[in-house]
Amino acid sequence: MSLGIHSLGPEARLRSRKDFDRVFKLGCKAAGRNMILWHGRTVPGRRPRLGLAISAKVGCAAKRNRLKRLVREAFRLNRPRLRQGTDLVVYIRPGCRWKGLAGAVEDLLRLAAQEGLLA
């Protein structure tokens, strides 16, 4: 199965526990009302990668999956705007009140700009 031109392939995701731990331990953190963003440097020139963390306190599985889809899509749409060589981990907070994609994009870009992660 080939991935479409607009898909977010496996090279764009943090998958291993080691990658998550490196970002949590050596990276920086920015907190917003609906999400917390950790970011760390990686191989220079590598396109940004995304990892997601979400608690069961956020809601049922359907709600958690919807919120994760929104963050992945916000990341996919704005990946070219993010600084190269950066790994991001997004923790979606309980009580997240996004009504749609616009809320996820707004929060992601606001925290990225606050931390100087926009190219």
Image (cartoon, grey):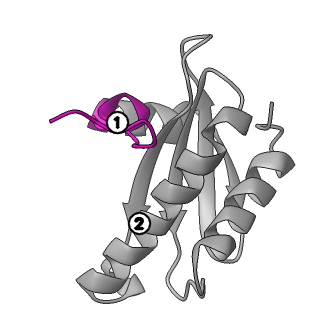
Which residue is at the front of the view, 25 or 35?
A: 35
Question: Badge 1 is on which residue?
Answer: 9
CA neighbours of label 2 inside 10 A, class few (<14), some (14 to 19), many (20+):
many
Mark 2, secondary structure of its residue: helix
Mark 1, secondary structure of its residue: loop
Which residue is at the front of the view, 33 or 72?
A: 72
Q: Is residue 13 magenta?
A: yes
User: What is the three-letter code of the residue carrying label 1?
Assistant: Gly
Look at discs 1 and 2 and give the one toward the viewer: 1
| Label ID, residue 68 | 2
- The quarter of the picture where the N terminus appears is top left
Q: Is residue 96 above or below residue 85?
A: below
Residue at image coords 40%, 42%: 8
Residue at image coords 74%, 66%: 106
Residue 49: x %, y % from top left: 49, 34
- The quarter of the picture where the C terminus appears is top right
CA neighbours of label 1 inside 10 A, class few (<14), some (14 to 19), many (20+):
few
